[in-house]
Every structure is written in C-alpha cells, then in structure tokens.
Amino acid sequence: MNLLEAIKLVPDHRKNRGIRHPLWLMLTIILLGSCTGYWGYKPLVEFTKNHQKTLIKLLALPPDIRFPSDSTFRNIIQALDFEILAVIFNVWCKQTLSIDEGELMAMDGKGIKSTLTGGNSSYQNFVTMVSVYSHHHGWVVRHQVMENKQKSELEVVEELVQELSGKKVVITLDALHCQKKTLALIIKSGNDYIVTLKKNQLNLFKAAKKLVSSTMASDENEVSECAHGRTTTRHTKIYPIPPEFLPLWAGAKHIIVVRRYGTRWEGKKSRRHLINFDEVHYYLSSLDWSASQFAEAIRGHWLIENRLHWVKDVTLNEDNDIRRGGNAPANWAMVRQFLVSLARMKGTHTFPEALRLMANQIEDLSELLFDLSGQDKPVKCLA
C-alpha cells in the first residue's frame, strides 16, 4: 500500500451534508503543498492556483474542478485526529525508507509546546511525538504520538521497539528508558542497545561505578576538537561486565564511561564568556564494540536533538506556530515530519538548502511522497 492508497482509506470525519471536496484530496494537497514551500492555509490556496494543471494531471482530477478555500483547509487541519497523520507517516516510511542491518537508531520524545493546555496546573496536557531517528541518514523511520495525560513515553518507546522487531539495529536511548522491561524487549526483538545510565536507576548506577573503580578498562579512545571557539576532549573507556554481574538487565555486556572536558560558552549573547567544564557520563550496552565505536555511537545519539528537534523548533518554528485551534498544532507537527525526512533525502549540506531545492518541485515531491509516476524507482539513501 502506497501513501495515496493509505490516505484514501482515511474515514471522513465530516457530516455528509455540504461536503464539496473529498478528504483524500485535501490531505494530498496539504502534504504536497507544504513540502514544496506553501506553508499555511492561504499559501495552500496559492499552491492550487499555481499548480492547477499539474495537480489535475497527477491526481486524475476533472478539468473543471474547484479547489478548496483557505477556510476549508483550516477546518480540516483543526478537526482531523492527529493520530491519523501519524499512522499515514509510518505507512510512507515503511514503503520508502529502508532500514539497514546494524544501523544506529535514536529514540526520543519531543513535546509540542503549542499543544499545551492547563498551564502549570495538575490538569496540564500536551502532545508528545516520539521518533525513531536514523543517525546516518538523518530521517525519521517511525514515530508515534501521545497525549501525556493518556500514555507515557515509556509505553510508546516499548511499542516502537516491537515495531523494529527483527531489523537487527542498534537502538540508542537516554536515561529515562534505562528500564529492565524496555531493554529486555530490545533484546527479545533481535536488536541491541546503548542507553544512558544515571541515578534514576540508583542500584545499577552504583554497581556500574563499583565495577569501573575495581577493574581495568579493556579499551579506550580519546578524541579532541576545536569548533566555534570551544574545545572539547572526549575520553571513552569500556569495561566488560562479568557473567551474572547484572542478571536482571537483559543482554548487558559493557559499561561505557565517557569523560568530556574542555571549554565552552556560557551566558547570553551580550555576556557570553568561556568556562571550563569536566563531566563524566555512564552508559550500558549489549554490544561487543571497541571504545571508538561506542564513542561515535554515543555522540551520534544527540543528532536527534540537533538535526531533528532543533530544526523543527528553530527552522520550522514548531513550538511557536501561529496556526492554532483544535488539533492544528499537532497536525502541522506531523506534516513537519514528512518535510524533515524529505529534505534529508535530498542529501544537501544544510536544511535550508534542501528547502530551497524542494520549492515548487511538485512532480519530484509527488513521486517521493505518493509514487505518482507509476515507476518502480528505489529511493537513494543519501547521508
């Protein structure tokens, strides 16, 4: 099933009376228009005017069709259940984005600020998107959305782990997901893990520190760099875990210790100054890797923050989106997932460069999104 077929299966939430435009057409225009540079309700109307002939040809529409107004687009985005677009995104990923054996996959959640309701009270609620992000390619291969009042991020990550069953990938996680059940599911699913270890698992943290202080590292690696006026040295050591040392933690084979030290900027622009820092972090893994391999994978995990969450917040203005009302903020966040992955597929040096390259490229994007060309052309996997 391709993306267009999946969209056509989405049940229409509207009342039959007064419907002028089929839901599948609305969703197709929203995705295609937004990803080619027409971001917003009135820009989508402009998109249909600028590309009327092409849309009629690609989607086999009647030549005299009247396209939707901006208020119609707004009503659809505000009323549509955001979980529908989340499911549609996963359908597209399964069809388009391959997952290679041994690939590093970061899992992490991001709350969508503009969905917050309830302020600072106990009734606070917001939508969180949990993504599975490829370290190498920079795109999202799976995701799920949740409301924090209804579900926890731990549950969602467990479900995503099972989604990747049999893929033989390495899943990297932050300390929140250093849980016996989660790690057991990863091993049972045929995958491996590298997880941050902190005091939220106090007994495990103490055991790791005791092992590190009482044994010699089996391998170590040191890398230094100077960038943007900062200097950083990363010293990585690995410690094999003896048999039966951590019997309750499935697959645990190594404790990894990373010491980071150097200088970095602190303070706001007008008062920025360099400070020295020296910090030590612990990790748990089911892999038999060298120190240099662990060092690269651990650093790569934070690409999900720098190349996904930061891009959506700063470049695409997700947290301060002016398009509010109903489910609009969450649905626009779903559209941004498509946009980020499509941009990464272009293999450009920067994200803004990819956006410029995609602008008005309706036929190119329609092939990547909906396979409207009718040809079997595998997607090139670009770094």
Image (cartoon, rainbow, N blue to C red):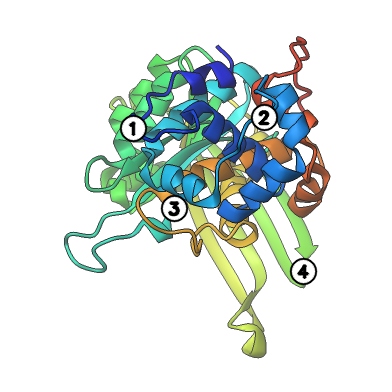
The residue drawn where x is 55% and y is 47% is 69
Horizontal and vertical percent for residue 256? 52, 41
**Tag 4: amino acid:** His
Earlier along the polypeptide chain: callout 3 or callout 1? 1
Marks 2 and 3 in Cβ contact (< 8 Å)? no
Residue 228 numbered mark, or none = 4
Q: Which residue is mark 3?
A: 329
Earlier along the polypeptide chain: callout 2 or callout 3? 2
Residue 116 numbered mark, or none = none
What element does badge 3 sit on?
A: helix
**Tag 3: amino acid:** Pro
> Which class describes the residues within 10 Å of circle 4: few (<14), some (14-19), or many (20+)?
few
Closer to viewer: mark 3 or mark 4: 3
> Which class describes the residues within 10 Å of circle 2: few (<14), some (14-19), or many (20+)?
few
Q: Which residue is mark 2?
A: 64
Q: Give the quadrant of the C terminus.
A: top right
In three-dimensional space, the C-alpha distance between marks 3 and 4, rounded to whole angstroms, equals 34 Å
